[in-house]
Image: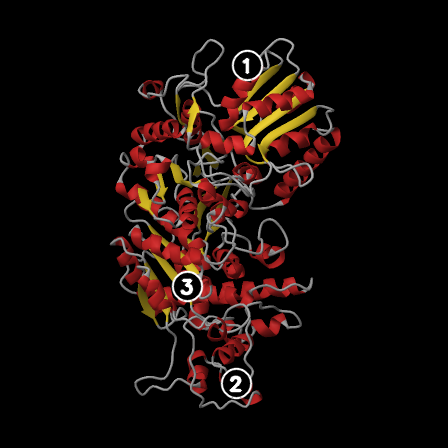
Amino acid sequence: MSNYSQAAWKAQQNRNDQLIADSKYMRPSVTSQVLPLQIDIGSTDALDDKQIATLQTLEIEAARISISSLASLATIGELDHLGGGLDLIPSLMLTLAATDYEKVQFTIENAHASIGYYSSLAALGFVDRDSVVHQFRRGLDIPGHVSWVPGGTQLNGGRLGVMIPVAAGQAMGMRARNSESWVVCHCGDAGWISGQALNGFNAADIGNLPLTFVMQRNGIQLSDSNKNVMDKDPRPIVEAMGVEIVETKSLFDTAEMFQAYKQAHSRAMEGRPTMIYPTGYSSADGDKVDFNWLAARFGIGAEVESITGKNGVSMDQEIWVPGAMMSYRDIGPMLECLLLVNDLPGGAGHHDGHMKGRDEAEVLANPMLTRNATQQAAFDEINAAAKAEVTTNARPAVGTENLTLTAGQLAEVSLPDAGKKTSARAGSEAGYLAVAKAYPDDVFVVSCDLNPSTKLGKACANIPAQNQIELSIEEQVALLVANGLAMSSDKPQVNVVSTFSAFFEGIAREGLELWRYQRNLNGVNEGLNVVMHMSHVGACTGRDHFSGWSLDWVTLAIGYLPYVDRFYAPADARGAFVAVRDACARYGAHIVAIPRDNLLVLSDENGDALYNADSEWEAVTPLRKHDGAKVAILALGATAGIALDAAEQLGGTADIYVVNGLPLPDGFLDGIFAQYDGVVTAEDGIIGTRCTGVRGFAGLVLSAASNSGTKTEHIGIVDPRIAPSEGHAEVWAHFGLTSGAIIDAAKSLA
């Protein structure tokens, strides 16, 4: 690394450290003094008047904090999704009352409604009111989407729909630890139609998971009403995926909402997922729902008469009042949203709500944001009560000891002999099996109808049924479910998801993308405690031609290195065992890349196996060293066999190193460049050309060599467009992945 690069890296780390130091909540552990709001849904038949008043007064407090926060944000010309945030508060407050952070947890799919989330936590005392008001969307502590803060959800939200399958994984993992576990997932009426969400509902059903979705059916999406954007009733579609619908009139009638929660909780304890769906209010059975009804229901007659009169709408106009109301309690925008969903004049959506040009004091003085005498008494009483102490701990540090194997357990493992040709899958199969036998209750497997090919079947046969789920060809949701499993416990456990590497590169990428925005409590976005098992990497996929190829797997893995503990690319079956054993032994995110076809089991210069069951994993293993060698051959993974053949033919002029994965040890490449005149890399993946841009492992080495003066050449796939549908050797030969190509490259550097 050049002096400039080293300085730039150090400067970035200093900025990172300073940002953490200046934050208030980004710590390994935070203890909060919170209001003693706790309701056991299972053992409570109905809410009494005091509980209802307490929940409602805290809703009002959270809404007031939200308004003040957006007023503060308006001073710098910014806005946020205030409407959805206010809508979230009533149901979220009840969820928070039910959450015990052990057997009951929650998450939020419509993460843009974050101001309601942060304000609810502030109302309870998990975070400071001033932090939410003055730092929301302006710092590390209180960012613009749902992120982990004390008392909150670990599941940091991003794309709509994604948290639904992740919550399914969380529920699956929690149930294995405690049969009374329950997860509540708040969701909007837009993201439910995404592919990830529909697959997530299916996973909840297949797994018989203790999971409840609470839908904010407010009738409004980003640009318009549901009716004008996605005119679909979610109920028959979600129910068809296996999730039972629990209907309730609204999420703002506290007593009625509680009964829906109670029914959903009861079904969760029976292993059935549900969705609480607020139907809203409309004229039926002789009861008329119009603007007069609305005015009386919320005690806002003057405000309703003003907006209907302004827009020429009769107070007798019959309407549908959604059971979840966008901009709830912010009367003006709330009524405009109501007009919008009823296609009436004056309607406006407030997905992007704001306080620009609005008087904060005037808004806060409205009757729906003002506590009545009963609510004020409840507010005073709970604030005067002894606070509950709640400690929120960060997830374990990357590299923390996870599931390790003893010497005795390793002694029972049988691996292929050196010199034999066999698939690396034999080693990975033995690795997962050994860990599953040693820790059956702590291993979780998500499968995609490929266990016979990815070789996870034997491990699955040794773990409980509730620790595994078969999702057929739903690769994308499988990765997301595995991510949720990682959030289910901070105890040592292995969460494996396996499929073909080609699917990781394509449809399954969302599971990897989630790692980019999962923040630990210490403020670091990091990968989760998941083993993503990429089988059939590279061109070695049998005779499937393009349909099965994974040619960009190395570049894909490099792109996620900031979030990955280790990326494994074992060169043979024995190395694959070591890789799997090491991945399971370390807490953190891991990618294990296993080729399909038969590869030579490597040996050292004495003829002994290069790797043994108890070998420590290392990123680079010297395979052959010679005195006076001028060229180093760095062979990534499966190419080690042809690199070995090349080195032997070169007659001692080149040393060979097996690259078992990434990241490389600090200073390794600098040492290589200092020792050799030239370096050749070899990998079974796309490397491009110097004209189109060198990528993959070749690109990594070429970039590092740029300031060293060392010459490099690179063996890999430069043009993937045309190829034969033949065996391993023939396909490699077509792409120039041969010992002869490595020899020529090495000689060109001499």
Q: Which residue is mark 2?
A: 302
Quadrant in which the C terminus appears:
top right
Residue indicated by mark 3: 91
Q: Secondary structure at mark 2?
A: helix
Residue 263 visible from this viewpoint: yes
Q: Is residue 191 above or below residue 520?
A: below
**Residue 591 x/y as whole percent:** 47, 36
Q: Give the residue type that dot 2 points to.
A: Ala
| Sooner in the amino-acid sequence: mark 2 or mark 1 | 2
Q: Is residue 48 visible?
A: no
Q: Is residue 688 left or right of residue 167?
A: right
Q: Quadrant of residue 541?
A: top left
Amino acid carrying mark 3 in the image:
Ser
Q: Earlier in the sequence, mark 1 or mark 3?
A: 3
- Measured as percent of width and height from the top left, residue 414 is found at 33, 20
Q: Nearer the viewer, residue 712 or 276?
A: 712
Q: CA distance from mark 2 to mark 1?
A: 91 Å
